[in-house]
Amino acid sequence: MEHSLNYTDILKKTLQEATIPQPRLQAIRLYPVCDTDSGHFLILATGWDKQRWIDTILFHARLVHDQVIIEEDNFEEGLTSALIAAGVRREDIMTSLEPSL
């Protein structure tokens, strides 16, 4: 079954929800970056953390052949459970550390 289109929408919505401004982050802003053509979905964090500038990737997933491959997930709770709750099948989620078939 073709899940790519639906998984694209789920990834975009999940990333947008995860980047809603959070007061405890103060001067750090989160940005969703969703490139549906290449299948890359990222959350960037930029801003000042005390005396140093932060510019980092908090989350990176790729959508490849109806599978969500999580390359990086630096959220405290992780976004995997949010993706599953939104409709991505658990068996369609892999990490970059797992061998692909």
Image (cartoon, rainbow, N blue to C red):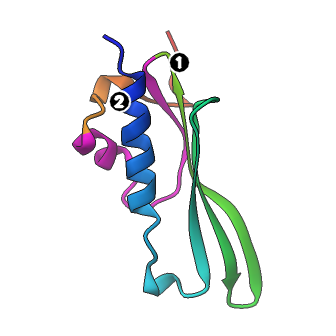
Secondary structure at numbered mark 2: helix
Residue identifier under label 1: 99
Above or below, comparing residue 74 to residue 41 in the picture:
below
Above or below, comparing residue 3 to residue 71 in the picture:
above
Above or below, comparing residue 101 to residue 58 in the picture:
above
Residue at mark 1 to residue at mark 2: CA–CA distance: 24 Å
Question: How dense is the environment of label 1, judged by Cα within 10 Å: few (below 14), some, or many (20 and up)?
Answer: few
Label count reads 2
In x, y percent, where is residue 77? 36, 59
Above or below, comparing residue 75 to residue 59 in the picture:
below
The numbered dot on residue 72 is none
Secondary structure at numbered mark 1: loop
The numbered dot on residue 6 is 2
In x, y percent, where is residue 93? 39, 29
Placement of the N terminus among the 4 image quadrants: top left
Which quadrant of the figure has residue 92?
Answer: top left
Q: Which residues are magenta?
A: 66-86
Q: Residue drawn 38% across and 49% down?
A: 13
Residues under numbered marks 1 and 2 in contact, where contact means CB atoms less than 8 Å apart: no
46 left or right, relative to 3: right
Q: Earlier along the polypeptide chain: callout 1 or callout 2?
A: 2
Q: Residue drawn 44% across and 57% down?
A: 16
Amino acid at dot 1: Pro
In x, y percent, where is residue 14? 38, 51
Question: How dense is the environment of label 2, judged by Cα within 10 Å: few (below 14), some, or many (20 and up)?
Answer: few
In x, y percent, where is residue 58? 57, 57
State yes or no: residue 83 in magenta: yes
State yes or no: residue 64 in magenta: no
Amino acid at dot 2: Asn
Q: Residue drawn 39% across and 38% down?
A: 9
